[in-house]
Image (cartoon, rainbow, N blue to C red):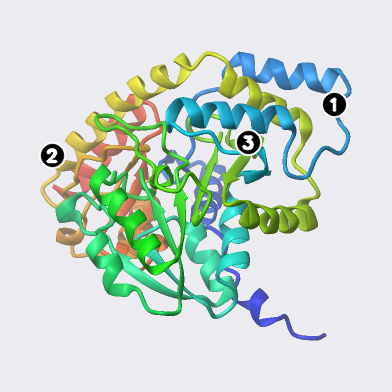
């Protein structure tokens, strides 16, 4: 048989699903596994969102729709931006996609390309590095540091820029660390992008999921009309992970190219799913506050619990639902600790190096779990490590 292409041979996928598969196999063998590997809310999608999609499905809204997204959803996104960001994009700046993940691929494909240069945080979201590897992109890594709560430092971004840099990718609130950049830091990154005429992809999927901070978007500088592209979606804040509904807001020429790529690969995003998105944005928002109140309790419990273990320390995340503790004093590497936690303690978590080499010495736990599950995991770790 013919060999696979170089692109295919560089595919890596997502470590979270690999760990989930291992954990489920152990469960089939009778092991009691505590799951902290997958990053998704354990809440149900609010009922009014499901009802809107059901009504659309029952009404026969099952055919092809505009590949950029139904106008009702794009208008709802414009309304949302006007409410939360203070500006109103045009509907032709928006492309609705089947989940937010494809936008990472689409943006790199259209703005960087095979062998191109871009800047990305390290540690960073799994899919960033999977796409970077697929395209064989020369990624200039900006190391995140525990000392400043894992915020992307604009000075470090400046130090990595070359004349060939085409894209800066930033993520605040951040996966895997829960770090939240300050308003001044975000403004400076937007200034850097303008100064060097570089595209800026701002992953704001956790923008509604903050504890003691306010969300700020670099897009207020150019209103996504010149170089800023916003990646967002419904999975996290509205507990809609399985719905696979995301969107980007971008300069019109960028949106056209991303839209063509989306059209070529996916044709369009399910219409009845998009009607659920309309209900999410236009309907009551109290479910987010309820969820975040519960996540606050869980964050406080897991951070306090991890810091009570002598060989572990953990900074307080200000957004998302991830803890990123330092495990260097255990004497194990991140991979060794993750294997030990799963195989010996029945705790499924992710090695920090799954998010880039800058994650060495750390592991990630998604605390979108019950307080009982969190407390059980802390007790298992305490017994093993103290």
Please tell me which of labels 1 and 2 falls first in the chain.
1
Assign a secondary structure to mark 2. loop
The circle drawn on residue 308 is 2
The circle drawn on residue 242 is 3
Mark 2 or 3: in front is 3
**Within 10 Å of the Cα at label 1, are there few (<14), some (14-19), or many (20+) other Cα atoms?**
some
Q: CA distance from mark 1 to mark 2?
A: 53 Å
Q: In the figure, 271 relative to 346: above or below? A: above
Whether residue 30 can be seen here:
yes
Please tell me which of labels 1 and 3 falls first in the chain.
1
Q: Depth check: give the residue in front, 331 or 289.
A: 289
Q: Residue at x 54, y 46 (%)?
A: 24
Q: CA distance from mark 2 to mark 3?
A: 35 Å
Q: Depth check: give the residue in front, 343 or 72.
A: 72
**Left or right: 336 with respect to 33?**
left
Q: Residue at x 67, y 20 (%)?
A: 50
Q: Quadrant of residue 326?
A: bottom left
**Left or right: 365 with respect to 32?**
left
Residue 349 point in image, percent of width and height: 39, 49
Quadrant occupied by the N terminus: bottom right
Q: Residue at x 23, y 30 (%)?
A: 300
The circle drawn on residue 327 is none
**Left or right: 101 with respect to 333?**
right
Residue at the disc numbered 1? 61
**Within 10 Å of the Cα at label 2, are there few (<14), some (14-19), or many (20+) other Cα atoms?**
some
Mark 1 or 2: in front is 1
């Amino acid at each position: 048989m013919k060999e696979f292409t170089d692109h295919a041979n560089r595919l890596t996928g997502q470590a979270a699903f690999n760990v989930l598969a291992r954990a489920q196999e152990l469960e089939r063998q009778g092991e009691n596994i505590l799951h902290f590997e997958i990053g998704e809310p354990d809440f149900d999608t609010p009922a009014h969102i499901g009802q809107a999609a059901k009504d659309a499905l029952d009404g026969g809204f099952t055919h092809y729709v505009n590949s950029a997204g139904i106008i009702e959803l794009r208008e709802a996104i414009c309304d949302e931006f006007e409410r939360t960001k203070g500006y109103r994009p045009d509907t032709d700046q928006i492309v609705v996609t089947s989940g937010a993940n494809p936008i990472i691929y689409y943006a790199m494909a259209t703005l960087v390309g095979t062998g191109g240069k871009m800047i990305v945080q390290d540690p960073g979201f799994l899919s960033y590095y999977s796409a970077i590897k697929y395209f064989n992109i020369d990624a200039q890594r900006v190391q995140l540091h525990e000392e400043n709560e894992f915020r992307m430092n604009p000075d470090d971004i400046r130090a990595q820029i070359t004349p060939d840099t085409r894209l800066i990718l930033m993520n605040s609130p951040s996966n895997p660390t829960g770090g939240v950049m300050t308003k001044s830091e975000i403004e400076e990154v937007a200034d850097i992008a303008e100064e060097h005429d570089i595209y800026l992809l701002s992953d704001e999927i956790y923008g509604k999921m903050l504890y003691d901070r306010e969300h700020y978007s670099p897009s207020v500088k150019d209103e996504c009309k010149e170089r800023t592209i916003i990646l967002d979606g419904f999975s996290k804040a509205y507990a809609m992970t399985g719905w696979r509904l995301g969107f980007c807001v971008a300069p019109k020429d960028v949106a056209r190219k991303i839209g063509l790529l989306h059209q070529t690969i996916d044709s369009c995003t399910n219409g009845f799913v998009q009607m659920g998105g309309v209900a999410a944005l236009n309907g009551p928002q109290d479910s987010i506050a309820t969820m975040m109140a519960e996540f606050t309790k869980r964050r406080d419990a897991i951070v306090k619990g991890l810091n009570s273990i002598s060989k572990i320390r953990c900074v307080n995340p200000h957004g998302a639902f991830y803890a990123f503790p330092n495990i260097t004093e255990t004497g194990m590497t991140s991979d060794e600790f993750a294997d030990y936690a799963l195989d010996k303690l029945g705790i499924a978590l992710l090695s920090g190096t799954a998010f880039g080499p800058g994650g060495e010495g750390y592991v990630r736990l998604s605390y979108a779990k019950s307080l009982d599950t969190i407390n059980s995991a802390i007790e298992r770790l305490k017994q093993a490590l103290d």
